[in-house]
Amino acid sequence: MKNSIENVVTIREATTSDIETLIEYNYRLAAETEGKELDQKTLRAGVEGLLTDPSRGKYLVAEISGRVVGQVMFTREWSDWRNGEFWWLQSVYVARDVRRQGILKQLYQAVAKRAQEQTGVVGIRLYVELENRVAQTTYERLGMREAGYSVMEMLELKVAE
């Protein structure tokens, strides 16, 4: 019989009691994937803002023996072209000591199952750093494919003249 961590993982919605772990994991995620150091006050307000307003999205967490070992956040985007919602995966993180044991797969499957059970959800999307081939390969194994889009942003909120 195969020894599998999948049998001991519980996936659940995050609650306000998970705030410190969510903040820590988001902080680590930014440092590990983008070399960014997030402002703790802003990060805390962002995590609290989502947890207190479900219309913004949800966090799911993976737990083993009472310890949160992974997280995923999903938010919603309306598509007029498809007359439905895309769910965007964000803040995906698994603790280093339990990586490559199927936890991300279980988090992804939990989101996908919720999406399939909702009327009007047409797909799941996420963005991945262009150089992060490990993450891209992982998501491809879960059934995701390159969307053919490039993400552009304007953080300064200046209107182009």
Image (cartoon, rainbow, N blue to C red):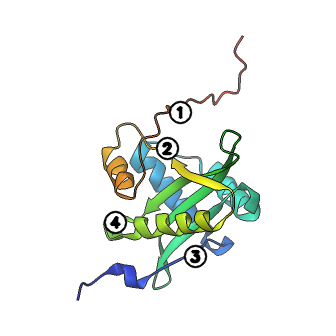
Pointers 2 and 1 in contact (C-beta within 8 Å): yes
Q: CA distance from mark 2 to mark 1?
A: 8 Å
* Badge 1 element: loop
Residue occupying image coordinates x 34% and y 38%: 131
**Residue 127 badge:** 2
Q: CA distance from mark 4 to mark 3?
A: 18 Å
Q: Which residue is mark 4?
A: 99
39 and 60: which one is in front?
60
Q: Horizontal and vertical percent for residue 48?
A: 70, 60
Determine which residue is flagged by label 3: 12
Q: Is residue 22 left or right of 77 when viewed as pictured?
A: left
Distance, label 4 to label 2, CA atoms, is 20 Å
Q: Earlier in the sequence, mark 3 or mark 1?
A: 3
Assign the N terminus to one quadrant of the image. Answer: bottom left
Say whether disc 4 or disc 2 marks the residue closer to the N-terminus. 4
Please state which amino acid type lies under the numbered disc 2: Tyr
